[in-house]
């Protein structure tokens, strides 16, 4: 991609009380790109997403978003600059209904007092209902999110990101626990987001990765091991080595 | 599962409650009894205040009595300055100041000559103090039980300061011998119907205003924060701001309850901002249903009402504490969402029996799930 990067990590390091989870990570993602991030368990993929969205702090290095430094910003400010996140562990608002979950995610206005005055919310309700249809949750709009099945919770999380409508979307294992059919439906949605949104997707399912990605970045022991298309990656001996002892990249 | 119909049901329940409390004076002519009911309603307001922060936003404020007490003192100061027999010293000094060798009215007493300022201060002083404390705890992302510990500690400190500063606060005795509050020509004596109506009308207004607030988007975000405060941040909301907002609103409402309490009791006392009452508020809220404004208010009225009648009656003189304890345990065990949820629990049981899959168990649901959404 000749585009200038919208998101850039430069020599980023993250420590967990002495343990280097990420060490000298360099990553550039172009606007509108869909980048897949793979790697064996414990490679630091989740931590890489965490450090971008501000959940953990970088010990060293710099993260820039559209040329601006976001390394030290609090989470909500990073989010306001257009970074949305789906977590590996499903995290929806379990006490709230599906509809209310979507409404929270639909965050066009963020201030306390701006939102106190907002009682009538019918216009956005229509949009949200359409969104629910897209991910097949239209029948459970008034159900509490805590009552959803695992698969439905995954869909709700994806819908939350769609409602949030961030420029950059970070997805951590979006298809975990989904059936093959559901995985393909997710691939379709993700492909539709490509172009308008920039996506960084962590995934283990290679079939899914092949379906959606342009460029794949392989991480190992907290740094980038290889970068390239799916076939390039799979032919790379260093990558094979890294996956040794695990089930192998093709089935990872 | 909040459907349109349930919203209507809820509004109806609120309306019925308000009509009932507003009709009480028509059937109760005994001034002593009416005064007692007014007290219960003030406790209802106080409990509602905690429901705003604890029930809706998950902030367990064990120092709620600070706001209540400060509101009460504000009102007492204004009334004290208007009491005629205070002129035992020069320049209309309150009697206890004279006894403590204070010769001029302290600067912070001065503005309480004005009722307008007093009413403002009764809301603003608790809110400002809450704001300062909230600023520190919410910016530092203190949550859960630590909020409870910090607010409790603050309560103890402020209580000690008030008792210690006897020259300005009346110390242990509080501020007593007050004149009757008069506004727009109406006298709000402790045993008057006017005072009862004042409390009942304020509770009614607060119930509906609170409901509107919690149905606004801000209310929704507060409930999301209660559920998972971290997740809310990644949508771009400044969680600390939202938490501090409701913390201050709750404090102001408690301050209002405190002002009313002075009218009903005819004095202000350091026991109003002591630990026992602060803990009682938590119990009222929990028994009635902390996530419901009506539940919280009802909880306070029911608990203090039962407590009052049990401790008054000769039969239960020795056992009323035991009975109250048993009531709490039963409610906490069988109705974790409080008395207000009785209807939901019964309805929920019926619904769950009708459904094939037990919805609460993710393991089961996971197996049952894939087909459903994959089909689309
Ligand atoms: N909060 C934490 N405290 C201490 N160590 C952590 C913490 N979070 C992650 N780690 C460690 O950092 C390393 C990288 O973890 P990370 O979760 O980023 O891996 P991952 O690539 O996402 O793995 P997986 O594929 O299993 O999700 C692991 O060795 C993990 O044990
Ligand atoms: Mg991970």
Image (spheres, coloured by chain):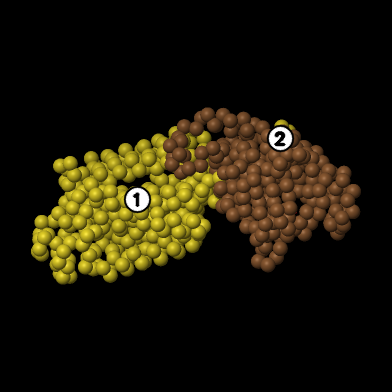
Chain colours: A brown, B yellow
Residue B162: percent from left, percent from top:
29, 65
Q: Is mark 2 within 8 Å of ligand 2?
A: no
Residue B179: percent from left, percent from top:
15, 54
Chain under label 2? A
- Give the number of the disc on residue A96: none
Closest to the observer, B173 or B356:
B173
- Tag 2 residue: A195
- Which residue corresponds to the image point at 16% horizontal and 51% vertical from the top-left? B180
Is residue B354 something one can see in this rendering? Answer: no
Crowding near the residue tagged with mark 1, few <14, some 14–19, many ≥20 C-alpha atoms within 10 Å: many
- Which residue corresponds to the image point at 48% horizontal and 43% vertical from the top-left? A111
- Which residue corresponds to the image point at 56% horizontal and 52% vertical from the top-left? A74
- Tag 1 residue: B252
Residue A40 horizontal side relative to residue B240, left or right: right
Quadrant for residue B270, please give it: bottom left
Chain under label 1? B
Closest to the observer, B297 or B112:
B112
Closest to the observer, B354 or B82:
B82
Residue A188: percent from left, percent from top:
74, 34
């Amino acid at each position: 991609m000749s585009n200038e990067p919208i998101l850039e990590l430069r020599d980023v390091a993250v420590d967990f009380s002495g343990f280097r989870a990420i060490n000298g990570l360099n990553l550039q993602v172009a606007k509108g790109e869909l980048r897949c991030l793979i790697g064996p368990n414990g490679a630091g993929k989740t931590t890489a997403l965490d450090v971008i969205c501000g959940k953990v702090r970088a010990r060293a290095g710099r993260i820039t978003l559209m040329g601006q430094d976001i390394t030290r910003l609090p989470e909500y400010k990073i989010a306001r600059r257009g970074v949305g996140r789906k977590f590996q562990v499903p995290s929806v608002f379990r006490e709230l209904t599906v509809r209310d979950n979507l409404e929270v995610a639909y965050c066009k206005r963020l201030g306390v007092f701006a939102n106190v005055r907002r009682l009538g919310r019918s216009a956005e309700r229509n949009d949200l209902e359409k969104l629910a249809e897209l991910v097949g949750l239209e029948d459970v709009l008034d159900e509490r999110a805590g009552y959803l099945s695992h698969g439905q919770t995954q869909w709700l999380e994806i819908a939350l990101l769609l409602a949030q409508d961030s420029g950059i979307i970070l997805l951590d294992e979006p298809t975990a626990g989904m059936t093959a059919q559901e995985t393909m439906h997710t691939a379709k949605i993700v492909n539709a987001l490509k172009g308008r949104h920039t996506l960084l997707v962590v995934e283990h399912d290679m079939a899914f990765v092949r379906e959606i990605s342009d460029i794949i970045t392989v991480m190992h022991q907290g740094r980038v091991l290889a970068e390239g298309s799916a076939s390039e990656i799979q032919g790379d001996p260093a990558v094979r080595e890294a996956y040794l002892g695990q089930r192998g990249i093709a089935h990872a | 599962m909040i459907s349109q119909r349930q919203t209507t049901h809820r509004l109806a329940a609120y309306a019925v409650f308000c009509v009932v409390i507003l009709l009480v004076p028509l059937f109760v002519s005994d001034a002593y009894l009416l005064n007692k009911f007014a007290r219960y309603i003030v406790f209802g307001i106080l409990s509602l205040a905690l429901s705003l922060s604890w029930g809706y936003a998950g902030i367990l404020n064990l120092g709620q009595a600070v706001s209540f007490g400060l509101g009460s003192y504000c009102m007492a100061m204004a009334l004290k300055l208007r009491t005629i027999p205070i002129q035992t010293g020069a320049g209309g000094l309150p009697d206890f100041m004279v006894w403590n060798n204070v010769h001029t009215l302290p600067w912070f007493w001065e503005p309480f000559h004005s009722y307008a300022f007093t009413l403002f201060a009764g809301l603003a002083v608790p809110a400002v103090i809450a704001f300062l404390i909230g600023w520190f705890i919410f910016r530092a992302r203190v949550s859960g039980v630590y909020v409870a510990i910090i607010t409790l500690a603050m309560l103890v400190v402020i209580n000690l300061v008030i008792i210690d500063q006897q020259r300005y606060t009346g110390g242990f005795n509080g501020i007593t011998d007050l004149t009757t509050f008069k506004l727009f020509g109406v006298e709000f004596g402790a045993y008057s119907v006017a005072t009862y109506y004042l409390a009942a009308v304020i509770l009614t207004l607060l119930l509906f205003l609170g409901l509107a607030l919690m149905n606004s988007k801000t209310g929704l975000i507060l409930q999301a924060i209660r559920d998972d405060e971290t997740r809310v941040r990644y949508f771009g909301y400044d969680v600390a701001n939202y938490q501090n907002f409701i913390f201050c609103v709750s404090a102001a409402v408690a301050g209002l309850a405190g002002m009313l309490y002075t009218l009903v009791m005819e004095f202000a006392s350091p026991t109003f901002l002591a630990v026992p009452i602060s803990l009682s508020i938590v119990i009222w809220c929990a028994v009635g249903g902390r996530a419901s404004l009506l539940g919280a208010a009802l909880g306070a009225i029911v608990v203090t009402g039962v407590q009052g009648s049990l401790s008054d009656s000769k039969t239960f003189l020795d056992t009323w504490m035991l009975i109250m304890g048993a009531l709490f345990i039963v409610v906490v065990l069988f109705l974790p969402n409080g008395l207000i949820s009785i209807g939901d629990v019964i309805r929920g049981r019926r619904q769950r029996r009708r459904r094939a899959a037990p919805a609460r168990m993710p393991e089961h649901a996971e197996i049952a799930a894939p087909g459903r959404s994959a089909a689309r």
